[in-house]
């Protein structure tokens, strides 16, 4: 087994766990979505990488509550809360930071 094989397996295991956690958290927050971004989404993580998640919901209050639930579940190290409208605007906008997040983000509430 190569190092690349081990990395792929470890990332697949991490993603499976995140998908499972996302399903549990979102069962209590209908209408929301969770997106993994950063090094774990891109696949260039290392032993010091944190787990970055976007909590997206129809309203600011719902997004904040979803972000809190993600943190309480121990699912991520950093969580950003956005409304669905903000997420759509940012991921398709001109800001290179948000464009990169939009390009690399993995939706966790889909298999």
Image (tube, grey):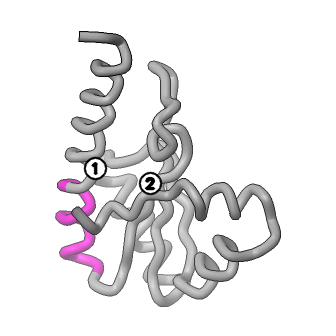
Left or right of 105: which side holds 25?
left
- Residue 81 is marked as none
What's the magenta bit mostly, secondary-structure-wise?
helix
> Is 81 located above or below residue 78 in the figure?
below
Quadrant occupied by the C terminus: bottom left
Residue at image x 27%, y 67%?
A: 110
> Is 26 located above or below residue 13 in the figure?
below
Residue at image x 21%, y 46%?
A: 16
Residue 17 image offset from top left, x and y in percent: 21, 45
Residue 69 image offset from top left, x and y in percent: 34, 63
Which mark sits nearer the N-terminus, 2 or 1? 1
Quick check: is 25 in the magenta stretch?
yes
Q: In front here: 77 or 54?
A: 54
Residues shaded magenta: 20-29
Quick check: is 96 in the magenta stretch?
no
Q: Which residue is mark 2?
A: 36
Q: Which residue is mark 1?
A: 18
How many other residues sit within 10 Å of disc 1, few (<14), some (14-19) or many (≥20)? many
Check contact, mark 2 vs mark 1: CB within 8 A.
Answer: yes
Residue 95 image offset from top left, x and y in percent: 80, 65
Q: CA distance from mark 2 to mark 1?
A: 9 Å
> Is 68 located above or below residue 51 in the figure?
below
Element at label 2? strand
Residue 25 image offset from top left, x and y in percent: 25, 65
Residue at image x 28%, y 50%?
A: 18
Residue at image x 67%, y 56%?
A: 100
């Amino acid at each position: 087994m190569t190092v690349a094989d081990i990395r792929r397996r470890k990332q697949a295991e991490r993603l499976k766990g995140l998908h499972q956690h996302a399903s549990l958290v979102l069962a209590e927050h209908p209408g929301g979505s969770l997106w993994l971004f950063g090094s774990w989404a891109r696949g260039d993580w290392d032993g010091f990488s944190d787990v970055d998640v976007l909590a997206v919901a129809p309203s600011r209050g719902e997004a904040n509550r979803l972000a809190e639930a993600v943190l309480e579940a121990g699912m991520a190290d950093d969580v950003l809360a956005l409304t669905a409208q903000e997420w759509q605007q940012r991921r398709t906008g001109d800001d290179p930071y948000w464009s990169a997040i939009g390009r690399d983000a993995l939706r966790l509430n889909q298999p």
